[in-house]
Amino acid sequence: MKKKEIIRRCYGGMKERHGVETIILFHVGDSFEAYFDDAETITRITEVPRFKMTAAGIPAIRISDAALEECRNRLLDAGCKVCVSEVRGVSGRHILKINETNTETGR
């Protein structure tokens, strides 16, 4: 299966499970990535630069592990629901952490 198809399938499945309004962040290596409309939303709110995955042509953003907390808090402060998805092993099992409000500010 090609990378584009894998991303579309995982992204679509997560959106279906957690709602189209939820921003899905996938843990990939030492960073977190978001795709399609989520990448657009994150860029608009946090000014993280957007790029297109060259082979697949998918709009995406990449957030370093160190910047995740700040980015997540800015999204939560803007009223977004955020789901962090960690894929472990070839089984594709997801470990989720879903935030609906900023726990530091209570917003």
Image: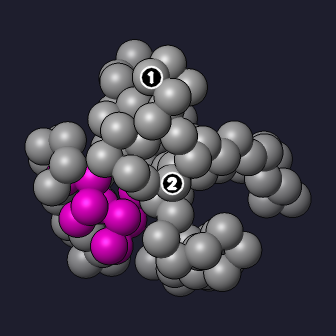
Instruction: Spot the residue most to the front.
Output: 106
Q: Amino acid at mark 1?
A: Thr
Q: Pick the residue in front: 30 or 77.
A: 77
* Residue appearing at x 66%, y 46% in the figure: 98
Q: Label 1: few (<14), some or many (≥20) within 10 Å?
A: few
| Magenta part, dominant SS | helix
Q: Quadrant of the C terminus?
A: top left
Q: Quadrant of the N terminus?
A: bottom right
Measured as percent of width and height from the top left, residue 50 is found at 17, 55
Q: Label 2: few (<14), some or many (≥20) within 10 Å?
A: many
* Residue appearing at x 52%, y 63% in the figure: 22
Question: Is the residue 61 above or below the residue 12 in the image?
Answer: above
Residue highlighted by disc 1: 105
66 relative to 54 in the view: left or right: right
Secondary element type, mark 2: strand
Whole-number angstrom distance, CA of label 1 to CA of label 2:
15 Å
* Residue appearing at x 57%, y 47% in the figure: 100
Magenta highlight range: 34-43
Residue highlighted by disc 2: 81
Measured as percent of width and height from the top left, residue 93 is found at 84, 55
Q: Amino acid at mark 2?
A: Lys
The answer to whether residue 14 is magenta is no
